[in-house]
Amino acid sequence: QAYRPEPPSTHLTQSLVCCGAFIMQRIGVIAGHINALVAAPCAGAEDVAKEMAPTGKLRVALNMRNQLLVSGKTADGLPDGLAPSMALAFAEKLGVPVEFVPYDDAAKLADEAAQDKWDLAMIGADPARATHIDFTPPYCQIEATYAVPTTSGAHKCAEVDKAGVTIATCAGAAYTLWLERNIKNATVEKVEGHDETYERFRSGGFAAVAGLRSKLKKDASKRPGTRLLKDKFMAVEQAMGTKKGRSQGIKALTDFVAEAKKSGLVKQLMQKYKVDKDLSIP
């Protein structure tokens, strides 16, 4: 069911008025996009709010390691960036405040889905994380590729999957989960931490190290004598997720993501945080 331009309930209107000024200041996007989203509230928003924010706050889990999505902090010390701003815009539609729950990596965030620690997760969607999480379609995606020694004969990602080849990759990352399912011939070696992964790649004399293209480019100086392959082996689909069993919540989230892409909100946020060259909207 698509968003309907119905007048919000008295209760929802009062809630939006209370939190609207704060949200608008935080996410700082073109007012027209936010107004368009708020003017079309979720059907049964009060019921969705009760399901999605049973404590009275929308507890939003963030992967602080992904700097494309969590760019930094606001003046008052709150997480800032594309993912926090998307979560804030959804909370505004429900008329509830937000409490951010930071995680050092996506793996722990996903592992704690069965516990009562968060309500909304801003995380890469993956089948391995879907045991306790329902995901929306992606609102953006990030290319993953390989860095290889400059002397390597590999020019395409498919050429890396050969017997006798070892790929170093960061444990718990969405692209690592993909590699574990899809690599048929090469060996996938998981390492804790990005810098540690680069060191293992170097010291082990491995044929490739996997990563997000933007991260591999940024960390080029940590891997002298390497180059990036021009294609990708997959794209990490960044989505909004909630706990299984929240049928109204996942429907509202899915509708919100669709409208946020259609209205231009996602694009505006990507441009605001200067990540539009590293991310794409599927």
Image (cartoon, rainbow, N blue to C red):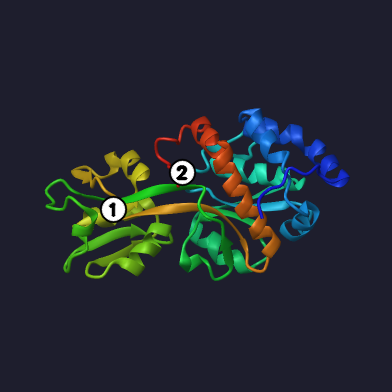
Check the picture and name the quadrant holding the N terminus: bottom right
Q: Earlier in the sequence, mark 1 or mark 2?
A: 1
Disc ID at residue 199: 1
Q: Is residue 187 left or right of residue 181?
A: left
Task: Kindly report which numbered mark, 1 or 2, lies closer to the viewer in this rendering.
Answer: 2
Q: Quadrant of residue 81?
A: top right
Residue closer to the observer: 127 or 98: 127
Q: Is residue 144 left or right of residue 150?
A: right
Instruction: Name the secondary structure under disc 1.
Output: helix
Q: CA distance from mark 1 to mark 2?
A: 33 Å
Kind of residue indicated by mark 2: Ile
Residue closer to the observer: 38 or 269: 38
Q: Residue visible at 22% across and 42% down?
A: 224
Instruction: Name the secondary structure under disc 2.
Output: loop
Residue 231: give x, y in percent of width and height: 26, 48
Q: Which residue is mark 2?
A: 281
Residue closer to the observer: 45 or 164: 45
Q: Residue visible at 85% across and 40% down?
A: 14
Assess disc 1: are there few (<14), some (14-19) or many (≥20) residues with their C-alpha within 10 Å of its C-alpha: some
Q: Quadrant of residue 77?
A: top right
Q: Residue visible at 40% across and 64% down?
A: 177
Kind of residue indicated by mark 1: Glu
Residue 189: give x, y in percent of width and height: 30, 65
Disc ID at residue 121: none
Q: Residue visible at 36% across and 48% down?
A: 143
